[in-house]
């Protein structure tokens, strides 16, 4: 071993000792933060004691999910996989790298560097926590996992721990402008040994993990009281079932209404009440997505909104603004602020919730882009989610026409 390699390994060992010290001494602060944000009815059950490296796979519905996991796995320091957005703020990014050093992952791209970092960390004997859904739930139901999840778990050759959090969505819906109080539970579902995973196909592994993590908040009957319960719901539900209008819905206090007269109430148990054909957000969401797909099949399909900003992600978490103005989506491509990006060679876009704002990340032509509506928080922007849903279907139909599968 040369001196340069030995020096790098010594530095890694110093960092690991520092991160373990932080993990062991910040647990009381983490517990306090959870209690201040969500009250006292948060019970992360102690995780089973495991030796050596392993992967923890939780479902993802709450901005504090990583803290629930940390409190359950209190006795073992681990590294978390986090969105690249978290590293952009200089002070926050510096503190994160210094104290906990999460593994950075760029959403909306096939981030091979994140996979390599996960495998390197495991080979150093340190557990890793990865949220395989990649994004927080929009409607209270768990999402399908990335198709490459099973492949990664086979490659890792370490125990895999599935961990289910219930109540997380109902206390902190992704679209909401306020926190609600109610029970949150976190527990280990199952521990898969590498010998068991070796005998399964990647698809079988992904299916089992999905089953372990499945949560449907539409089955809830408990109250989760709070203020302004329906505000922000228009980010998730943007298509009116009465008039068919897009972007005409608004949440105010606990009511959700459209300019056409439709009116519903968001109840404390997370259900919808009123003269509407749905009682669960997931039902409404499934309906609107199907309507979008039907609309997309029309020859003259197009969608547009004003006030968008297109950015390019550069090295070192830097961003460069490429254009500002009208956002349009059609079969010709995605155009924002006068910059047209054809759909060819575009990878599936992903949404990222950061700083109370939704952004869409995607890769096209080997470059990574970010799209958002940078309006003041007091002004509700158009839902960028509808663009992501349509893009996913456009890209998928294009791949099917070309005889390809979905990009991983």
Image (spheres, rainbow, N blue to C red):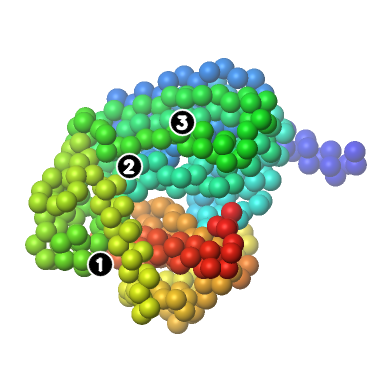
Residue 60 rendering spot, x and y as whole percentages: 43, 40
Q: Residue at position x 21%, y 52% from top? A: 231
**Res. 146 in view:** yes
Taking 243 as reference, is 103 above or below it? above
Left or right of 111 on screen, residue 396: left
Q: Which residue is mark 2?
A: 140
Image quadrant where one finds the N terminus: top right
Residue 9 rendering spot, x and y as whole percentages: 78, 37
Q: Contact, CB < 8 Å: mark 1 with mark 2?
A: no
Residue 234 rendering spot, x and y as whole percentages: 25, 57
Q: Which residue is mark 1?
A: 246
Residue 310 rendering spot, x and y as whole percentages: 46, 71
Disc 2 crowd rating (10 Å Cα; few below 14, some 14-19, many 20+) is many
Image quadrant where one finds the C terminus: bottom right
Disc 1 crowd rating (10 Å Cα; few below 14, some 14-19, many 20+) is some
Left or right of 280 on screen, residue 365: right
In the image, 199 versus 288, the foreground residue is: 199
Q: Earlier in the sequence, mark 1 or mark 2?
A: 2
Q: Residue at position x 56%, y 54% from top? A: 106
Q: Residue at position x 44%, y 76% from top? A: 331
Q: What whole-number distance in Å separates the C-alpha atoms at marks 3 and 2?
A: 16 Å
Q: Residue at position x 51%, y 34% from top? A: 209
Taking 59 as reference, is 407 above or below it? below
Q: Secondary structure at mark 1?
A: loop
Q: Which mark is residue 403?
A: none
Q: Which mark is residue 212?
A: 3
Q: What whole-number distance in Å separates the C-alpha atoms at marks 1 and 3?
A: 35 Å
Q: What whole-number distance in Å separates the C-alpha atoms at marks 1 and 2?
A: 22 Å
In the image, 259 versus 3, the foreground residue is: 259
Q: Secondary structure at mark 2?
A: loop
Q: Secondary structure at mark 3?
A: helix
Left or right of 117 on screen, residue 48: left
């Amino acid at each position: 071993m040369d001196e340069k390699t030995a020096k790098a390994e010594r530095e890694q060992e110093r960092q690991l000792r520092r991160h373990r010290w932080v993990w062991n001494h910040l647990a009381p602060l983490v517990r306090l933060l959870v209690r201040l944000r969500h009250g006292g009815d948060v019970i992360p059950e102690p995780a089973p004691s495991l030796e050596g490296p392993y992967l923890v796979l939780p479902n993802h519905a709450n901005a504090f999910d990583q803290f629930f996991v940390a409190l359950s796995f209190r006795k073992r320091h681990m590294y978390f996989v986090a969105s690249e957005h978290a590293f952009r703020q200089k002070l926050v990014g510096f503190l994160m790298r210094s104290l906990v050093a999460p593994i950075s992952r760029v959403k909306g791209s096939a981030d091979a560097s994140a996979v390599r970092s996960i495998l390197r960390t495991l080979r150093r004997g340190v557990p890793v926590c990865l949220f395989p859904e990649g994004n927080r739930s929009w409607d209270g139901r768990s999402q399908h996992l990335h198709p490459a999840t099973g492949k990664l778990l086979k490659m890792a050759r370490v125990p895999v721990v599935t961990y289910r959090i219930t109540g997380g969505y109902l206390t902190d819906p992704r679209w909401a402008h306020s926190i609600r109080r109610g029970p949150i539970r976190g527990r280990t579902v199952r521990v898969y040994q590498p010998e068991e995973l070796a005998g399964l196909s990647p698809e079988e592994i992904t299916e089992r993990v999905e089953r372990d993590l499945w949560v449907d908040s539409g089955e809830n009957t408990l109250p989760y009281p709070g203020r302004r319960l329906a505000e922000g719901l228009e980010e998730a539900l943007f298509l009116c079932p009465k008039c068919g209008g897009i972007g005409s819905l608004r949440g105010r206090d606990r009511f959700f209404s459209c300019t056409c007269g439709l009116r519903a109430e968001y109840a404390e148990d997370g259900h919808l009440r009123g003269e509407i054909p749905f009682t669960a957000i997931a039902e409404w969401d499934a309906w609107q997505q199907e309507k979008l797909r039907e609309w997309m099949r029309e020859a003259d399909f197009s969608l547009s909104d004003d006030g968008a900003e297109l950015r390019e992600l550069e090295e070192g978490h830097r961003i460069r603004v490429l254009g500002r103005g009208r956002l349009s989506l059609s079969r010709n491509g995605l155009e924002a602020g006068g910059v047209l990006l054809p759909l060819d060679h575009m990878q599936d876009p992903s949404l990222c919730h950061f700083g109370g704002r939704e952004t869409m990340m995607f890769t096209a032509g080997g470059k990574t882009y970010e799209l958002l509506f940078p309006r003041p928080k007091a002004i509700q922007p158009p839902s960028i989610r509808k663009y992501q849903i349509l893009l996913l279907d456009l890209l998928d139909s294009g791949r099917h026409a070309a005889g390809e599968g979905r990009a991983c």
